[in-house]
Image (cartoon, rainbow, N blue to C red):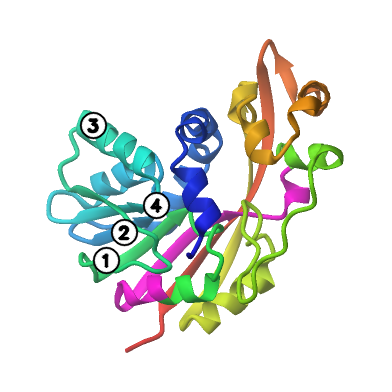
Amino acid sequence: MANEAETRKWNDEQWVESWRRREKLTDAVTPCTLDAVSARPGQRVCDIGCGGGGLTTALARLVGADGDVVGIDLSAPLLELAGERADQAGVANTRFVQLDVQTGTLDEAPFDIAVSQFGVMFFDEPTAAFRVIRSYLKPRGRFVFACWQSVERNPWYLATSMRPLLPPPPLPAPGKSPVGPFSLGDEEYVLDILAAAGFDDVHGTPHETKVRAPASAVFDQTMLRFMGVPPDREDDALQIVARHLQRFAVGEDEYEYPLAFTIYQASDAKS
């Protein structure tokens, strides 16, 4: 099964509930993503790994009533949340589809633009997945996505401090690639994947910003299970978390997190 572990995690109710609090980090990146996309009225857009649908709704407003946006995710709970948010915003030109892009078929294609904000780092066969995304596009269609730079440039990420408590990460199965938030943190690697998938006119623009948010934006205790912290080491883990977060503290349960990400743009090479 493709992306088996990610499918299981993103359909876990506890993981999804904690994700709502972590959106504060990704929401800080949305203005940069929208600026790079430059969606116009009447265009058709797909939002890959749309999560809770915040970016999808913003894109729908930009393309207007004559355009439409399809949000795609493998998480049923997040798609339910995305649909609720679109309804609350009064956005009628959106649809949401539960689909693993790496293996599924999307009847709504083709699109003018494929967009993703932190949704493409979890494919265990990234070149194959990017080829599928390319197939969703009209000739000379555009692919725009945001992904984190290296973990060293994103010190807010807690798992780096947890390493003494965590088991070694499992080796990918034959033919599979490592996945995770920082799997596309190396620009040369990303450019190679995009070229192998048939994209051209590829370039990445690095960005840095800071966001103020509570501790829950990067951690809550339910995450320990997903990290693999043994139950008998949870107290040790919480002490590590407190020390880790202290460097970002600016007030009572207020922290300033530095974010480093890259926005890539590419075109479909088929004429």
Local secondary structure at mark 4 = loop
Can I make out residue 53 in this image? Answer: no
Can I make out residue 196 in this image? Answer: yes
Q: What residue type is labelled 4?
A: Leu
| Region of the chain picked out in magenta, as a range | 132-154
State the image coordinates of residue 216 (x, y, percent, origin top left): 60, 24
Compare residues 36 and 248 and report the one nearer the observer. 248
Local secondary structure at mark 3 = loop
Eye-nearest disc, 2 or 1: 1
Which residue does the image show at 18% across and 49% down from the upper left?
64
Can you identify the residue that label 2 sits on?
Answer: 46
How many neighbours does mark 1 have within 10 angstroms: few (below 14), some (14-19), or many (20 or more)? some
Local secondary structure at mark 2 = strand
Please report whichever mark, 1 or 4, sits nearer to the chain's N-terminal start.
4
Query: Can residue 19 be found in the magenta stretch?
Result: no
**Residue ranking furthest to the top:** 252
Q: Which amino acid does label 3 sit on?
A: Ala
